[in-house]
Image (spheres, rainbow, N blue to C red):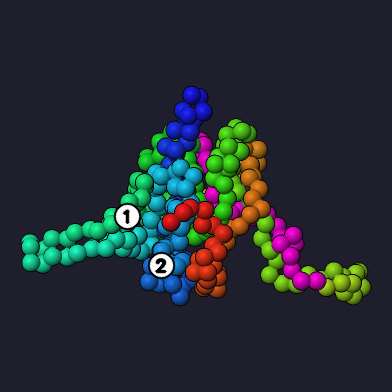
Amino acid sequence: MVQAICLAMEEKMKVVLLAGGYGTRISEESHLRPKPMVEIGDKPILWHIMKEYSYYGFYDFIICCGYKQQVIKEWFADYYLYNCDVTFDFTRENRMKVHNSVAEPWKVTLVDTGLNTMTGGRIKRVQKYIGNEAFLLTYGDGVSDINLRELLKFHQSHGKMMTLTAVNVEQRFGVLEMGEDSGIRSFREKSVDDGSRINAGYMVCQPEIFDYIEGDSTVFEKEPLETVARMGQLMAYKHDGYWQCMDTKREKEKLDALWRSGRAPWKVWSD
């Protein structure tokens, strides 16, 4: 009984998605639309992220919009048109009939958090939609096969203010081992073990985190996280599985190829 109540409470947790930035590093795509709306396969990467969360039972989304926010809002407003067969009957009062209706178990709140607002400011602006509750938080430009239930369980086990997911990032170049005389002792190709752990997003926050965000100019990854870390209130959930952000056109093409091959590691849900 207690387990069932806890599960019900978890499923009501809100998921905050940061989707308001300019996406300047992938400008080939983002000059037309926000980076979270850049497509992997035939769906925006934002859709892929939401499908992962809903697979683990999280259906209530708050999306922090900014740059070209109308593209995101129009896509959700026309979700049926994009995903169903439709008949437009112009002979009978311009009626529209939706066939084989595709429904997601989602509640989606789209919030204009400003054009030039920093990440912390965007989170602060949606506080009124979250209330005094713990919430899930991530970026709208990365996919992973992380078990979100296990992430939440880890967060609840330590009782700290915040948990972020830490992943290993592979070195881009070959590794040199040199002596004091600058002579190269060995050379080997890059390995995932050469990388450092970084913040991959997929965070869990207690509502107290809002107290450490001053306003629109606050970069969440700077003062708030640095302060919480100094306080000993920031924990890392280590994920050694798949994670990939989409910062560049090359990364977009890599994700797209994986999806089209049917071997996308982040696709944990069934069609």
- Closer to the N terminus: mark 2 or mark 1? 2
Q: Is residue 204 magenta?
A: yes
Label 2 residue SS: loop
Q: Is residue 110 magenta?
A: no
Picture residue at 48% right of the left edge, 33% below the top: 7
Q: Work out whether residue 40 or residue 231 is closer to the camera in this orientation and state it.
A: 40
Check disc 1 and give the amino acid type: Val
Q: Is residue 114 left or right of residue 168?
A: left
Q: Work out whether residue 167 or residue 3 is closer to the camera in this orientation and state it.
A: 3
Q: Is residue 173 visible?
A: yes
Residues rendered magenta in the picture: 188-214
Q: Which mark is residue 102?
A: 1
Q: Give the mark toward the camera: 2 or 1.
A: 1
Callouts 2 and 1 close, C-beta under 8 Å: no
* Quadrant occupied by the C terminus: bottom left
Mark 2 highlights which residue? 42
Q: Position of residue 234 (x, y in %)?
A: 62, 41
Residue 154 to residue 94: above or below: above
Q: Which mark is residue 270?
A: none
